[in-house]
Image (tube, coloured by chain):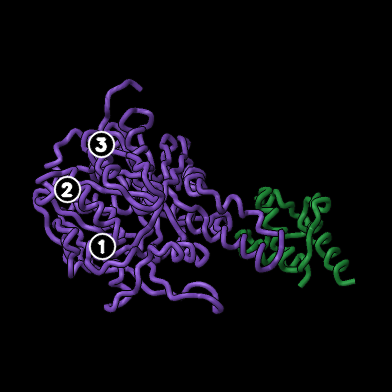
Chain colours: A green, B purple
Amino acid sequence: MNAFAYLQEVLTEKYDIKPEAIRPEATLEALGLDSLSVAELLFDVGDKFGIDVPDDRTDFKTLGEAAAIVDELIQAKRS
Amino acid sequence: MAGGRRRVFVSGLGLVSPHGSDPAAMFERLYAGESAIRKVRSGSAEFGNDVLMAQSELDPAGMIPKSQLFTMDRVSQMAVVAAYRALATAGLLADDRGPADAGIYMGCGLGGAQAIQDAYSTYYQRRSRKVKPTSVPLIMTNAPAAHISMRYGVLGPSLTYSIACASSAIAIGEAFRAVRDGYLDRALAGGTEAMLNDGSIVAWESLSVLAKEHPDGPAASSRPFAADRSGFVLGEGAAVLVLESEEALRRHDAQPLAEILGYGASSDAHNLTQPALGGQVRAMRSALADAAIEPAAIGYINAHATATPVGDKVEINAVKETFGAHAQRLAISATKSMHGHLVGAAGALELAITVLALQQRRLPPTANLTVPDPACDLDCVPCRGREAPGLEYALSNSFAFGGSNAALIVRRA
């Protein structure tokens, strides 16, 4: 599972966001996620993929940007 | 608001209790002497235990948005659901909003017990410093009150009283004073507790205060006032009452369920876990003075009685000292025999039961009281509920570890 697919799953299941709203260009703010929700989301992502999203990589605005950073960290962990 | 004491009424009642969420149905089950205590496997396969407990069913659907559930420990979810039901029965819920002018007074002993366990499990078992970012807001003891405020748009003070087993009795007492003395027109007052997770249970087990399973079965294991009592059974749940001034009640044409008349609180200054007669007597006398009624007016006491060998006897003696000859005429029952000990929610649930007893003029029994302790020789309403024609005033006791005592007096509306 890639990062975006997992984000889709969590945002639908846990945050109750409509699937059609979960697009790469959607900002987390527009999806109604406050800072605590974003922190929890990153925790879940880290838990799922066994990675740690460092504080200096959390300047993303959109879901696509967040997914790209997570994919990159997953790759870095594998190599 | 100008001085003078105002009358304070209970206008709404919301429950998440071991006997369900409907107050009338809960009371019927209690009246029939039905225990909600079960034996449940708790903890890991490696070192778990079969534990006696009184669990509550929690279904937040329709009352808490799904997207908010991860921000609330079970203790907060139960409080928000109980508050919903309390506001709905008071007729104070419109378009999912509650009364903006109310205050919130909640009792809670431990806070987010499951979240505490989860965080420590991550730290110790997974050997990771990465615990959930929601850990602190899930754990904090004031989270239930905060969530009630946010969920229903309540703008008055949202306060949390953490006084172990007396938490919610004191929360209700303080709310009563705030409304009576004109600081607020209405308040949501009650308590919540959810510590039936194994990490909490082992701490209680170590204290050697929990009941042993009775030969008649798990449901018969909480036996206040009985010769063979062996301790208490933990329960979980939430109870929230809506308190309103007479004027506030009239403004929305609501029917009062009961009137709160008096509140007394005291400290033993004695021992962390052992109760003291003097402190309990002072709490009850203070409540009677506050209510400005004669001791002989009280027809029913919902006892704190947790079924520990020491505690029940002290309370009986405190009632004898407070009420004198009238102690032999009043009825006193311990409903913890059926719903267990809800700790921070105990006082609120028991006051709710007391309100229902006054309304229906029927007394819930002390279940399992087949062979009374000779030292508990008052009318403890053994085993079967009983009609109480003419019942006007009742008192509910709550005594906490740490030696904090509270008594509340209610009148039939």
In the depicted view, which residue is nearer to us: B136 or B206?
B206
Q: Extreme right residue here?
A: A79
Do badges 3 and 1 share one subunit? yes
Label 3 packing within 10 angstroms: few (<14), some (14-19), many (20+): many
In the current view of this chain or complex, which residue is farthest to the top?
B2
* Chain to which mark 1 belongs: B
Label disc, if present, on residue B224 of the rendered structure: 1
Residue kind at label 3, given as amino acid type: Ser
- Indicate left or right for B290 with B82 as reference: left
Q: Which residue is mark 3?
A: B286
Q: Secondary structure at mark 2?
A: helix
Residue at (31% x, 43% y) in the render: B406
Q: Does label 3 lie on the same chain as label 2?
A: yes
Which label sits in the foreground, 1 or 2?
2
- Quadrant placement of the N terminus of chain B: top left
Q: Residues within 10 Å of mark 1 (few under 14, many from 20)?
A: many
The reply to whether discs 3 and 1 touch (Cβ–Cβ < 8 Å) is no
Image quadrant occupied by the C terminus of chain B: top left
Q: How many angstroms separate mark 2 from mark 3 (CA)?
A: 15 Å
Tell me where residue B365 appears, x and y as whole percent. 20, 62
Mark with earlier residue (1, 2): 1
- Whether residue B58 is visible here, answered yes or no, is yes
Q: Earlier in the sequence, mark 3 or mark 1?
A: 1
Tell me: residue A46, above or below residue B93. below
Three-letter amino acid code at the position of disc 1: Pro
Residue at numbered disc 2? B320
**In terms of image quadrants, where is residue B404?**
top left
